[in-house]
């Protein structure tokens, strides 16, 4: 049975993961569409930058976020002086860290989904007078909805398990930025907290596994639908 403090951690973790996925999804879709459909100088570099968080140590990603979006950072300093906004050491900072780490996985899932859409369908609609936006809204977007859902699940699973970038950029503040992985790390430092660690770890596994299974089911359903159509 979870304690009140542990429930607070769970609720904060879910809020951070959900907001991170919702905020990241439009950018992930736009990047996936550009990488799938467009050929331009620097495309390889853009692809590498998007996927950089997959291979970069998460602590380094958090440090870069701190340099850019911290109160004394290039962008963060301007946002604070102009709008009074600050992200470092806030739950919104945990959202940004989770979103950045989830972005490559979401882009990858969406890109595969967009590349699978037959371009001839879009071309046919265009020859019949449909605008680019109408063709996208009525053809590309509906056909990529399963991929969109799969990307959402993958992003959620990655966000719920985010640790390195979060602890560097948002710190480990109880009630503010202490999500499930950070809470487990904190409890591990205290003798006699094995049961609390076990509860939080089991909960993390359930949430992540559920999201991954949902993502896998959506991908298989998408593949089955295409096979049926063909």
Image: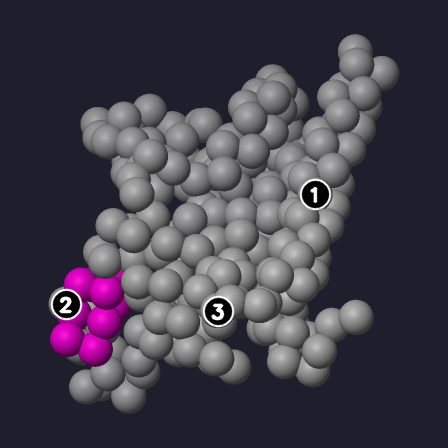
CA gap between label 1 and label 2 equals 38 Å
Please tell me which residue is depicted at 81% across the width and 23% down the height of the picture: 225
Taking the image as shown, residue 133 lies to the left or right of residue 164, namely right
Task: Say if 170 sits above or below 227 in the image.
Answer: below
Upstream in the sequence, badge 3 or badge 2? 2
Please tell me which residue is depicted at 79% across the width and 70% down the height of the picture: 1
Image coordinates of residue 15 in percent, x first then y, are 60, 70
Residue designated by label 3: 190
Q: Which of pointers 1 and 2 indicates the residue nearer the eye?
A: 1
Q: Crowding near pointer 1: few (<14 within 10 Å), some, many (20+)?
A: few
Image coordinates of residue 162 in percent, x first then y, are 47, 54
Residue designated by label 2: 74
Q: Quadrant of residue 200?
A: bottom right
Please tell me which residue is depicted at 28% across the width and 88% down the height of the picture: 84
Can residue 177 be seen here? The reply is: yes
CA gap between label 3 and label 2 equals 38 Å
Q: Secondary structure at mark 2?
A: helix
Q: Quadrant of residue 151?
A: top right
Q: Secondary structure at mark 3?
A: loop
Image coordinates of residue 71 in percent, x first then y, are 21, 77
Taking the image as shown, residue 150 lies to the left or right of residue 175, namely right
State the scheme by which the image is colored: one colour
Residue designated by label 1: 209
The magenta region covers 65-73
Q: Quadrant of residue 128?
A: top right
Q: Crowding near pointer 2: few (<14 within 10 Å), some, many (20+)?
A: few
């Amino acid at each position: 049975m979870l304690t009140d403090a542990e429930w607070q951690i769970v609720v904060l973790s879910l809020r951070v993961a959900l907001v991170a996925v919702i905020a990241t999804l439009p950018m992930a879709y736009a990047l996936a569409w550009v990488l799938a459909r467009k050929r331009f100088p620097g495309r390889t570099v853009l692809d590498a930058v998007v996927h950089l968080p997959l291979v970069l140590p998460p602590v380094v990603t958090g440090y870069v976020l701190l340099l850019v979006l911290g109160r004394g950072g290039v962008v963060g300093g301007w946002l604070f002086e102009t709008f009074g906004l600050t992200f470092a050491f806030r739950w919104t900072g945990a959202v940004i860290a989770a979103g950045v780490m989830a972005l490559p996985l979401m882009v990858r899932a969406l890109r595969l989904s967009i590349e699978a859409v037959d371009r001839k369908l879009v071309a046919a609609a265009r020859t019949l007078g449909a605008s680019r936006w109408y063709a996208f809204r009525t053809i590309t977007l509906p056909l990529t909805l399963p991929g969109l859902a799969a990307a959402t699940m993958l992003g959620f699973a990655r966000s719920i398990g985010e640790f390195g970038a979060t602890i560097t950029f948002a710190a480990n503040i109880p009630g503010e930025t202490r999500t499930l992985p950070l809470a487990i790390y904190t409890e591990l430092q205290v003798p006699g907290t094995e049961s609390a660690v076990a509860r939080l770890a089991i909960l993390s596994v359930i949430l992540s596994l559920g999201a991954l299974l949902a993502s896998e089911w959506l991908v298989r359903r998408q593949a089955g639908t295409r096979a049926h159509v063909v």
